[in-house]
Image (tube, rainbow, N blue to C red):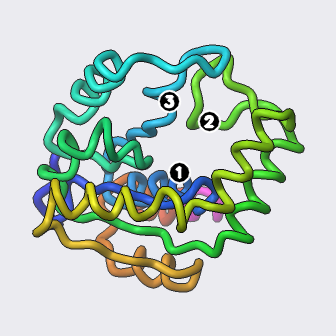
Amino acid sequence: MRNDAHPLHRMIILGSAGSGKSTLAREIGERLGLPVIHLDALFWEPGWKQPDDKAFRTRVAAAIAGDAWVSEGNYSRQTFDLRVPRADQVIWLETPRLLCLWRVLVRALRGGRRPDLPVGCEERVDWNYVAFLRYVWNFDRDTRPRIEANLKATGPSVPIMRLHGRAQIAAYLATLPVTGREACDAKASPAISAQEMH
């Protein structure tokens, strides 16, 4: 549901794998009361099978049909024409590639499935994952220029916020009004504390 108490109703978070897109999307969603859309969950099918572009675009179009959301994930070629023109803001996470690489490697070594992935897409270290690590390492050189070009083409007037590190992310979050679940938790806290005192 759209909340007119703040001007940000549709937001896009971009960045390399391991940059923190999913985490930030959840934090913003909780703070602003926005539904969170993880594009990886819409793209991948069980067993890491890829859908055709038409099927993926149909899923994305349905997910962003509402007038308020925060979506995380790149997929610039398939989705920017759907998402970017409607966005109030784009956030680029400028996370150092060594940190991105470390995060995705740790995720794979732990095994299991991330909450932003569909069932049947468990992460593990194998030869395919080695190729994925190479993609992460070369993201700024090979992938980022294409994303930046598609972003400029589909949303030249959409504001872009570039965040470097947790300190800047925390400072940015602090500028957002608390209108979602965090606000409900804050209102509930005094009542809970009063009950605990008796």
Whether residue 195 appears in magenta in the rendering, the answer is yes
Q: At which x and y percent is residue 145?
A: 40, 64
Mark in front: 2 vs 3: 3
Q: Give the class, few, some or many, for how many residues have Cα within 10 Å of label 3's Cα (few <14, many ≥20).
A: some
For mark 3, give the secondary structure: helix
Determine whether 168 is above or below 187 in the image: below
Mark 2 or mark 3: name the one nearer the start of the chain: 3
Q: Nearer the viewer, residue 33 or 184?
A: 33
What percent of the width, then of the height, locates residue 65?
17, 31
The answer to which of 172 and 191 lies nearer the viewer is: 172
The residue pinned by badge 3 equals 41
Query: In the picture provided, is 7 more to the left or to the right than 144?
Result: left
Is residue 166 in the magenta section?
no
The amino acid sitting under disc 1 is: Ser
Instruction: Provide the residue designation for mark 1.
Output: 22
Pick out the residue farthest to the front: 142
Under circle 2, the secondary element is: loop
| Residue stretch in magenta | 193-198
Cβ atoms at labels 1 and 2 below 8 Å apart: yes
